[in-house]
């Protein structure tokens, strides 16, 4: 049985969900971002217990097809930006279409309808959160960050950063007033 879970965005999320499943004696076959595969179907009581436990941890079971598609799009964008820096050089629409086997226009319209923002804006916000993370680590220069995240120039990164956060990257680095957001809150 496959379950789809909203707000799973990192390896720690996977561990938390796995722990919750094991606490309820539900032995997962696999736990991936946004997806869990179980050995068997859940009883209504087990499903309710799991839903309650997941909600307490900030997760949510997803039942409808549209919501699963949205979460899958988000999962792939988060993986692309935060875990696969080298692949950022591909076109986002091609990347998502090839991974999800759906027409990009369909996914884009669905995402905008449900989320109230575009896939592109969501992608930009994820990239800016990654920039914030890299700025706080203080291991890379702004030009190295721009190159790593496939910005055409430092100026482009700086303009986008200021538009999203209200700060220049150097000002953010100096004051760190705007704390980084959890990925599921972007």
Image (cartoon, rainbow, N blue to C red):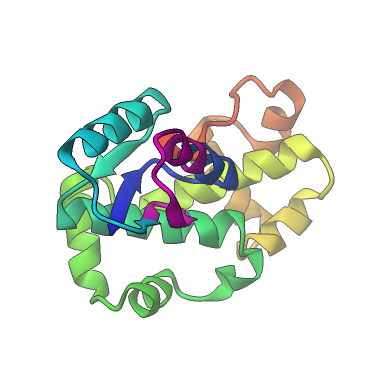
Instruction: Locate residue 130, reporting x and y percent.
Output: 61, 46
Give the left or right position of residue 30, taking residue 119 as reference: right
Quick check: can you spot residue 186? no
- The magenta-colored residue range is 17-36
Quick check: can you spot residue 91? yes
Answer above or below: position of 126 versus 99.
above
Name the foreground residue: 131 vs 95. 95
Name the foreground residue: 64 vs 123. 64
Instruction: Locate residue 151, reporting x and y percent.
Output: 61, 62
Answer above or below: position of 45 versus 177.
below
Instruction: Locate residue 111, reporting x and y percent.
Output: 23, 54
Give the left or right position of residue 130, taking residue 140 as reference: left
26 magenta-colored: yes
109 magenta-colored: no
Identity of the residue drawn at 39% across and 35% down: 24
Identity of the residue drawn at 38% across and 55% down: 35
């Amino acid at each position: 049985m496959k379950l789809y879970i909203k707000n799973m965005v990192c390896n720690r999320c996977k561990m938390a969900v796995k722990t919750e499943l094991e606490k309820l004696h539900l032995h997962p076959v696999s736990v991936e971002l946004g997806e869990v595969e179980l050995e068997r179907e859940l009883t209504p009581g087990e499903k309710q217990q799991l839903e309650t436990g997941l909600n307490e941890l900030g997760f949510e079971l997803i039942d409808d097809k549209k919501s699963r598609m949205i979460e899958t799009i988000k999962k792939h964008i988060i993986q692309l930006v935060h875990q696969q820096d080298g692949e950022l050089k591909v076109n986002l629409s091609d990347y998502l279409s090839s991974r999800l086997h759906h027409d990009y226009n369909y996914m884009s319209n669905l995402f905008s309808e449900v989320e109230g923002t575009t896939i592109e804006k969501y992608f930009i916000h994820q990239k800016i959160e990654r920039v914030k993370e890299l700025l706080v680590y203080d291991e890379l220069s702004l030009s190295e960050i721009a190159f790593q995240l496939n910005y055409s120039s430092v100026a482009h990164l700086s303009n986008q950063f200021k538009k999203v956060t209200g700060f220049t990257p150097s000002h953010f680095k100096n004051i760190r007033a705007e704390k980084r957001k959890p990925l599921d809150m972007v």
